[in-house]
Image: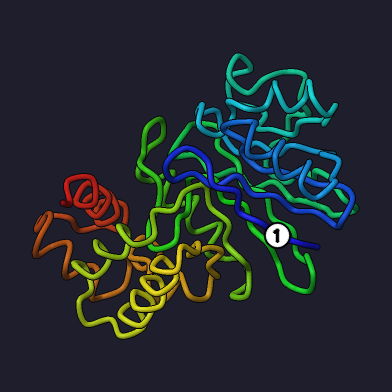
Amino acid sequence: MTLQPLPAFTDNYIWMLHEGQRAVVVDPGEAQPVLDELQAQGLQLETILVTHHHHDHTGGVDALRAATGARVIGPATEAHAVVPDPADRLRHGDVGRALGLAFRVIDVPGHTAGHIAFFCKDVGGTPLLFSGDTLFSGGCGRIFEGTPAQMLASLDALAALPDETRVCCGHEYTLSNLAFAQAVEPGNQALAAYVHHCKGLRAQGLPTLPSTLGLEREVNPFLRSRTAPVVAAVRRHANPLADDEVGIFAALRQWKNDFR
């Protein structure tokens, strides 16, 4: 299996997975990057996976379906008007199948009310997670339709996956996320090393993704919101009155919203 991030818009990635003949794409906000890659590699698009309803993740679905006949698998509770029908609509615990692989659906509300993630336990020997805009490398999505408690629970569900799980998220936000992470944990040596690594990749025009969950647990403040250094930083810089885990997480997310 070959995994490729296809750049779209200014900072989106459309993920493509293929075995030399058939392909799956995830969150195609626009069709043309996918059509170009299908033609360049002589691939047939079999399936489109959709994590949530935002247009930069769904805008190319109709054109791709019309051009290729691909089937669509998407979230059960997102609006049908913006996750285009016909689609196989799945919810937590359901399994979508493509390229002979089983993608387990994990409900991850917060960024949107019906956001889902797709997890496959073995793609080329390692697990694979398509996290959409819930979990980014070094960060998490803004909370538009859910609550901080929902987003924290969603991140907990993803953080429980194996360390070696490759994290394929929807945007190249890594360096800006890591700048915030260093403001939260300036003494985190694993974070400092990861910043250096990612700056080197971007200097070469390469994506920073996929990351791994094991690494994210070491560097991502939103997966570390219960650790002593992050709690202390939130109380010092954001909200001295935050006292429970949801309050700490909410203050951390607001701090990131305001961070420049």
Please rate how many residues cluster around mark 1, counting C-alpha atoms within 10 Å: few if below 14, some from 14 to 19, many from 20.
some
Residue that extends furthest to the bottom in the rendered view of this protein = 189
Instruction: Answer above or below: position of 60 versus 173.
Output: above
Residue located at (72% from left, 36% from top) = 35
Residue that extends furthest to the front in the rendered view of this protein = 40
Residue located at (56% from left, 51% from top) = 131
User: Who is closer to the viewer here, 31 or 150?
Assistant: 31
Q: Amino acid at mark 1?
A: Leu
Residue located at (13% from left, 62% from top) = 235
Residue located at (60% from left, 41% from top) = 116
Picture quarter containing residue 84? top right
Picture quarter containing residue 183? bottom left
Locate residue 14, reporting x and y percent: 60, 44
User: Who is closer to the viewer here, 10 or 229?
Assistant: 10
Instruction: Answer above or below: position of 26 versus 3.
Output: above
Instruction: Answer above or below: position of 18 versus 190.
Output: above
In the picture, measured across the screen, residue 88 lies left or right of residue 197, that is right
Locate residue 100, reporting x and y percent: 90, 53
Locate residue 224, reporting x and y percent: 36, 68
Q: Secondary structure at mark 1?
A: strand
Residue placed under numbered mark 1 in the picture: 3
Picture quarter containing residue 186? bottom left
Locate residue 1, reporting x and y percent: 81, 63
In the picture, measured across the screen, residue 98 lies left or right of residue 113, that is right
